[in-house]
Amino acid sequence: MNKQQESKVSWGVSYGEMVFREFVKGWLNVVCMVLIAFLFAVAILAPFLANDKPFVIRIDGRLYFPLFQDLRPNDYCVFLAAIIAGVQLFLVRRNRRRVEPSIRSAVLWRQIWVNTGILLAGVILLLIFIPRRLDATDYKAMVASGKGSGAIFAPVPYGYARTDLKMREQPPGREHWLGTDDVGSDVLCRLIHGSRISLSVGFVAVGISSIIGIAIGAILGYFGGRVDFVGMRIVEIMMAIPTFFLIITIVAFFPRSLLNIMIIIGITSWTDDARFIRAEFFKLRNQDFVQAAVSLGLPLRSILFRHMLPNGIAPVLVNASFGIAGAIFIEAALSFLGFGVAPPAPSWGQMLSLGVSTTGRFLWWLTLFPGLAIFFTVLAYNLVGEALRDAIDPRLRKAA
Amino acid sequence: MTTYIVRRLLLMIPTLLGITIMVFAISRIAPGDPVSLSMGPGGQLDAARAADVRKARMALYGLDKPIPVQYAKWLGRVARLDFGDSIKHHRPVIDIIKERLPITITLNLIAFVLIYTISLPLGVLVAVKHKQFLDRASSVLLFMLWSLPSMWVGQMLIGYFCGPTFKNWFPPAGLSSNYAEQLPFFPWLADRLWHLVLPVTCFTYSGFAYLTKQVRAGMLDNLRADYVRTARAKGLSNWVVIFRHAFRNSVIPVITIMATLLPAMLGGSVIIESIFSVPGMGLLAFEAVTTRDYNVVMAVATIGGVLNLIGLLLGDIAYAIADPRISFESSV
Amino acid sequence: MNGRSGVITFLFFLFLAVMILLQVLSMVQSDRLYERLNRLIEVREGGAAFRSKAEASSAGLPGEEYPGDEGDWLIWGLSGEPENLNTITSTSMYSRYVLSGNIFEGFLEYDPDKLTHRLVLAESYEVSKDGLEISFRIRGDVHFSDGTPITADDVIFTFETIKNPGVDAASLANYYRDIERVVKVSDREVKFIMRRVYFLSLEFTGGMPILPRHIYKFDKPDEFNKHISNPVGSGPYIFEKWDVGREIVLRRNENYWGRKPKLKKIVYRIITNDTAAIQSLRSKDIDYIRPLPDQFAELSKNEEFAKDIRCLSYWHPGVGYFWIGWNEDKPFFKDRRVRLAMTYLVDREMIGKHLLRNPEAKVPTGPFYIYGRQGDPNIQPWPCDPEKAKKLLDEAGWIDHDGDGVRDKDGVPFRFKYMIGSGVTLHEQIAKLVKDEAAKVGIEVTLDPYEWSVFSQRLKDRQFDAVNLAWGGAVEEDPYQIWHSSQVGNRGSNFVGFKNAEADAIIEEARQTLDEDKRNALYHRFHRILHEEQPYTFIYTRPEQRFLDKRVENVIIHKLGVDEREWYVPKEKQRYK
């Protein structure tokens, strides 16, 4: 306790902490963060929330755990990512207490690198070693016929790829709380599993676009001159081509998988980040600390990423939040047009496209619920981005 | 100033070449071609003929030559402003674009006018009533509007207002009713406006947020500036201060934004156009890509690219003219 | 400073003015476009030299007029636009709706009830005993819409245009490849000489649309290819205009040599949006559409709707069937038992009942028209029996050796990709169904959607494990293109790679068998082979469905379907002048 008090007094407040404090002053921002946390929880726990296999069932006297047996490598990767993210957040908090502000960001970077490495290694190992099982047994029928007993099902006992033609296009009711879609799959279940697609698209696409944008922007901004000249032409070329058009053209290239779509969205949206970083680096290039680093003979990658980048990253973070919202939009739009992930993947955009039937009959539950889901997710990220921008921008803070 | 403009114009040429090369390469390397599409899944041809037929048709459209040769040929034609014929429609691409462009521009213009008419006064208002209820409520509301996905809004509007389930106030698709061509001008215009209401709504609602925010930010800056304080001290009424002085200065960046809107205007929105079956540029580009109608794809990309670059240039120039503090050498 | 606000207001009004101008411009542009198309060639009406034939008598057509009152228009709602109106180069089904029977005619057509050939432009025809020569004698009173009589020169011109390699007519030319040449016997007589005996030769030669040489003649084939509008023929309707993207208008040929239809105009409105089509129908903007199965199922039960709209549902040989093809070159589908197992898995009755919502949909057992003579009516479809499917899979050696829930054999897990065209909802729905059912027996299916241009390519290059598609039908079909082993690969239509020596022999023999009963006996055997081998799983065949405004009368459903030429609207209900 004492050490903490001591630290607060003698160490002062770091930049990140300042932004954070400013950020949580607004109650709306906190609500958004809670909402985002909720979405993450839903996405991570999706197989436990909506699944047609029970947690446990007794057949012929033996206990089986179908749901756990059927977890896919994807699910394990998601759990791993969640755990590592949790560890990282814990470390951030610990840094605040134990680590000096001046080296805090360096320590933070190192932790992030290590954790990302662990995550990547873990993902690769999981994908290689965990078997993909296929289990489409109708457990509900087993329970009904008496072969199985003592079954505990998930709250939404349906699978997102299960079809039931007799229950096509049913409005919300007792059996299907949010109704069914055009082949009889449960809407709530698809919404829950769809959150995974939306959130992961957001993060991976923005991650890719940020990395590319930062790299290019840094090089252009630092070197300037001819490098900048040629580089800016390339950036202009990318900006001049209508993004959507480009995405659709590229989607035709590759087989339809979520990863491909994420990568494609990522590589078509890096131009904004590049321009921000370039502008920041122009400004920073002439500052003393950078000149000092150069004259000391530090390696280029160190100058760029350890010294300059942390100071210029603020607009990229802001843009990242809007970028996530934008990526979710684009994915929904692609799925809406039929260019997204292959069916029966539960994309919110794809569900929207079924909302108005060809007779003009309005299947409102297929429009309202996925639409609300997209809306709230995007809203949350937009508000967070907005609040971050306000928190970071000193002008407005002074004005307030 | 002229040297700057000339320099930028000259720079556009390599950039344009880059754009065209990239779009050309991507569209050709992508699998599928218009001949396969028009030949359909077949069932009419036997194997021996099918291969020949395909070869013959590819040759007919010049698609059998190596890609760089095709590009060079295309470039040569474009230099004479001949964008070729659409493989699907068998008509010159320019004609098709001339048909679709007015529609897209109309939609965008109306949206543009609406957005500006509402955002400018709103931005001023919330800046003046800074931090009060109106400011906060409108900022949240506009934000929510910005976060609404356009396909959702479109579907809801169609489902709710165009069908037998709820209300049947608006037509669900198209730009004019079927009998419209026979009407005299004013009823025709009324019918067209009736068809445009919903698509325009979809286009417009998300634009308010950004512009209002810009105006508000600019006004806030200016309202705190010294010259405004002086004006107030001189005894000028509040309205005069706001409109004659602060507003004019804050609207400058807004005007420069207008220039960059030029290319966006001609891009159209695939989603809205496909939901409402409006035959505009967005749908044209989309259909061209999906049917591998190469000439149309290249034409849209080229024209879009040119306008984009001109828009950027105009934006920079307008900004520089409007704000004497900006000097030219700092850009590019 | 003052100037700035003035500038802004000025700019606003300028934009408003520009907007209105653009609207007018878009209206004018499309007018100008069809003007251009029309300027290509002027259509001349028959001059004073030709009397309009009040009575139309011929050997084949019954002598009286069509019944009913004259007048009114029929307005179609087409869900797609023909890319061109040149009957030789066009491959789209939409152009067939517009052109065949209305503008262009051939020597023969099918009698809508007896399904035999009857005379149209031909006065008589003769097939030589060896089947290698077919001669037609053109009627003396037939002429094109501008009055020019039809002669043998027009027939020869049409044939040579089709065969001209520079003309973009390869698909059509394919049907005529067995015709070596056509000979002019006299001004009104032509003789087609075949290379080989082929039972469909009469149909192709008799059905060839006759083009007027004096209008379509060309120096370079490219001229002909560019002649995409203003079709001129000998039929009961004349082309009036093509408002691209909006409508195609035909008006009645007042100088028609045969029986004039009562409807004065046919308008084809292009409405691509399915919902808008129904709306237009209800608001009486259009009269006639082909609805989607869902639309038909829902609206035909709607009392209010059915009060004004005739809901037609009828069978005809062209309805075709929907199928899933199993690529026999892939390890999964080499074994007939596996293909049969897949058929046992799919609940085809459910698809008809719940997905198509059509109780009249049937499960086909083979590629022939379900009510035609080529198929064996005694063959019953395999039932839906997942247990049998599992047994068959076990027998074929596909057992879950490693306990991961997926069957495997020789180390290959039973995981395959099912290719569909993106954007067609029905295909997706059926695919999802198959995926679900397959999962229940231990087969993992991944759906592989592609856009149509890529889909077509992959289909022809046979880059798929399973694919679904639909074929249309005909009165008499030749299974050669789809089922003969020579048509595998090289972009032929035998996509699944069906190679069966017995089937090949039957197909080849049947082609040369001119006696219909003998030929059909052969096809019955062929049908049985397909039924046992299941290269396709035949999913459904359903009747043709149309919505037609109730004011139209004399809508008779023949064996061949409906014949729009015999329709009329009673005077008191007529809507258009």
Image (tube, coloured by chain):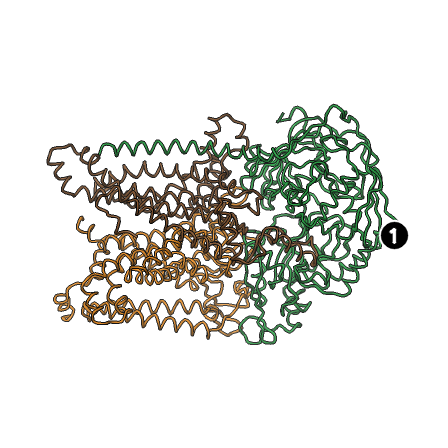
Chain colours: A orange, B brown, C green
Q: Is residue B232 above or below residue A313?
A: above
In the image, is residue A53 above or below residue C128? Answer: below
Residue nearest the observer in this picture, B227 or C506: B227
Of all residues, the one furthest to the front in this rendering is B3
Determine if residue C307 is in view: no
Residue B282 seen by the camera: yes
Instruction: State which quarter of the image contains the C terminus of chain C.
Output: top right
Between C42 and C99, the one lying in front of the other is C42
The residue under the point 82% across, 31% down is C57
Which chain is home to disc 1? C
Figure check: B108 above or below C527: above
Looking at this view, is B15 or B147 the one in front? B15
Q: Position of residue A61 (x, y in %)?
A: 51, 74
Residue underneath mark 1: C130
Question: Where does the image place residue C136, in percent across and percent down from the top left?
Answer: 83, 42
Q: How many numbered marks are there?
A: 1
Horizontally, residue C119 falls left or right of residue B13, namely right
Q: Image height check: is C563 above or below C539? A: above
Q: Image quadrant of residue C37?
A: top right
Q: Position of residue C353 (x, y in %)?
A: 62, 51
Residue type beneath disc 1: Asp
Question: Which residue is nearer to you in this view: C122 or B308?
Answer: B308
**Mark 1 Cα shell of 10 Å, populated few (<14), some (14-19), many (≥20):** few
Q: Quadrant of the N terminus of chain C?
A: top left
Q: Secondary structure at mark 1?
A: loop
- In the rendering, at what x and y percent does residue C133 appear? 84, 48
Is B236 situated left or right of C265 in this image? left
